[in-house]
Image (cartoon, rainbow, N blue to C red):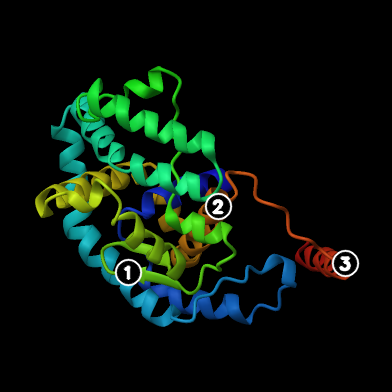
Amino acid sequence: MKQVKLLVAAAILMLSGCASKQSADAQATAAKQANLPKEVQQEIPDPFEDVNRAIWDFNYDVLDAYILRPVAVGYEAVMPQFARTGLLNAANNLEEPSSAVNNLLQGKGEGAAKSTGRFLINSTVGLLGLIDVASHMGLEVNNEEFGEVLGKWGINTGPYIMLPAMGPTDTRNFAGDLVDSAYFPLDDLTLWIKALRISIKAVEGRISLMAQEQMLNDSLDPYLFVREAYFQRSQFKLYDGNVPKPQVTEKEEEDFEAFLNDMN
């Protein structure tokens, strides 16, 4: 289940959220009122939840329903797979220099070297990144964002934010995205190339979500589901997949066992 949530969250980062408006408020209230032990509650900073939920509903009921999803369906139907892959490769290749710097800022010399090598190889032999030659040479993607750098430096995520059209983020990652966009060559792209790059990633992200969207819509509260998945993915990326297990006291463990017994 955790892996599925991570996949869903990865796609959601590129698009608007999905929500069930009729039951969201009632379900959220019930979740808050439930007297759950500390270890089964996730302390997620969401002080703007009411505003976030309103933006979430607008994103899905308007932007996704009438723009993003129809465009994604049409794009998948019309565009050949090799062309889709090439365009996405080129869009991702432009992030390699920022990834190299961010790796270096975390003391990951090998990762920085891989990102640098990938950019040089794919930008030349790979025809401006259309062909991922570097992966065939054993240089796997080692993407790092400045938000992860800030996390490694001990800066907390800050409040959870749902942005119009852009989807979920938090103050740390939002600030990190601004820094990443200032790196070469992203900062040197024309407005139209930037828009094309963002559109390609957004549409491909929406296509990736197609297989999981029913599970998302069927969840008890899609807003809470995506919020939790978003922070799980952030932690997963921050610790390179090796997320430390939370320390649970003996008292908390006893409370959790009592909670499970009450459910049976």
Local crowd at mark 3 within 10 Å, few (<14), some, or many (≥20)? few
Q: Secondary structure at mark 1?
A: strand
Q: Secondary structure at mark 2?
A: helix
- Residue drawn at x 60%, y 49% is 239
Return the disc, 3 or 2, that comes first in the chain's sequence: 2
Cα separation, mark 3 vs mark 1, equals: 40 Å
- Residue drawn at x 38%, y 29% is 117
Q: How many marks?
A: 3
Mark in the foreground, 3 or 2: 2
Q: Which residue is mark 1?
A: 163
Side of 133 where 227 appears, left or right: right
Q: Amino acid at mark 1?
A: Leu
Return the disc, 3 or 1, that comes first in the chain's sequence: 1
Cα separation, mark 2 vs mark 1, equals: 22 Å
Where does residue 124 sit, x and y in percent of width and height?
23, 24
Q: In this view of the protein, can residue 17 be seen by the observer?
A: no
Q: Which residue is mark 3?
A: 254
Q: Which residue is mark 2?
A: 238
Out of 71 and 191, give the one closest to the viewer.
191
Cα separation, mark 3 vs mark 2, equals: 30 Å
Return the disc, 2 or 1, that comes first in the chain's sequence: 1
Circles 3, 1 touching at the beta carbon (< 8 Å): no
Give the quarter of the image for residue 42: bottom right
Q: In this view of the protein, can residue 147 be seen by the observer?
A: yes
Where does residue 161 sit, x and y in percent of width and height?
40, 71
